[in-house]
Image (cartoon, grey):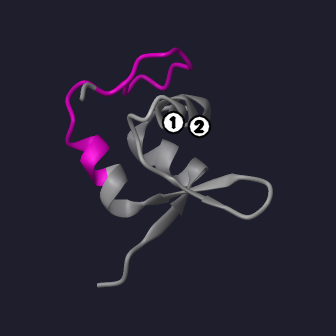
Amino acid sequence: MKNQILTTKEAATLLRVSPLTLWKWHRKGLAHAVQIGVGGKLRWPKHEVERLLGNPGNNRKGRDDSNTPAT
């Protein structure tokens, strides 16, 4: 199976959080994304989103706060 890459919006939808929350997790080093292009857009490996989904500590209410997945 090929590595699947998701946009921030797609990953956030699957995780039921806002794109901003996902970006905050990335900035804090709690979630791994790949930065592409000069503009710094993020892409999310599907295996990373699956890892976050399996973590009971992540914020699934879609709020835009600083709750982070437990590490």
Point 47% across, 32% down: residue: 25
In the depicted structure, whether residue 42 falls above or below residue 21: below
Q: Quadrant of residue 53?
A: top left
Please name the amino acid that badge 1 sits on. Leu
Q: Which mark is residue 62?
A: none
Point 20% across, 29% down: residue: 56
Query: SS at mark 1?
Result: helix
Query: SS at mark 2?
Result: helix
Count the numbered circles shown: 2
In the depicted structure, whether residue 22 falls above or below residue 63: below
**Is 52 left or right of 66, judged from the image as shown?**
left
Q: Which residue is mark 1?
A: 22
Residue 58 location (% of width, % of height): 32, 28
Please name the amino acid that badge 2 sits on. Pro
Magenta span main SS: loop
In the depicted structure, whether residue 27 falls above or below residue 42: above
Q: Quadrant of the C terminus?
A: top left
In the depicted structure, whether residue 51 falls above or below residue 60: below
Q: Residue furthest right?
A: 39
The span shown in magenta is 50-69
Q: Residue 28 magenta-drawn?
A: no
Residue 20 location (% of width, % of height): 61, 31
Q: Residue 58 magenta-drawn?
A: yes
Q: Residue furthest bottom?
A: 1
Residue 57 location (% of width, % of height): 25, 24
Q: Which residue is mark 2?
A: 19
Point 58% across, 50% down: residue: 8
Q: Observer-nearest residue: 17 or 55? A: 55
Separation of marks 1 and 2 at Cα, in angstroms: 5 Å
Q: Are marks 1 and 2 in contact (CB under 8 Å)?
A: yes
Q: Residues within 10 Å of mark 1 (few under 14, many from 20)?
A: many
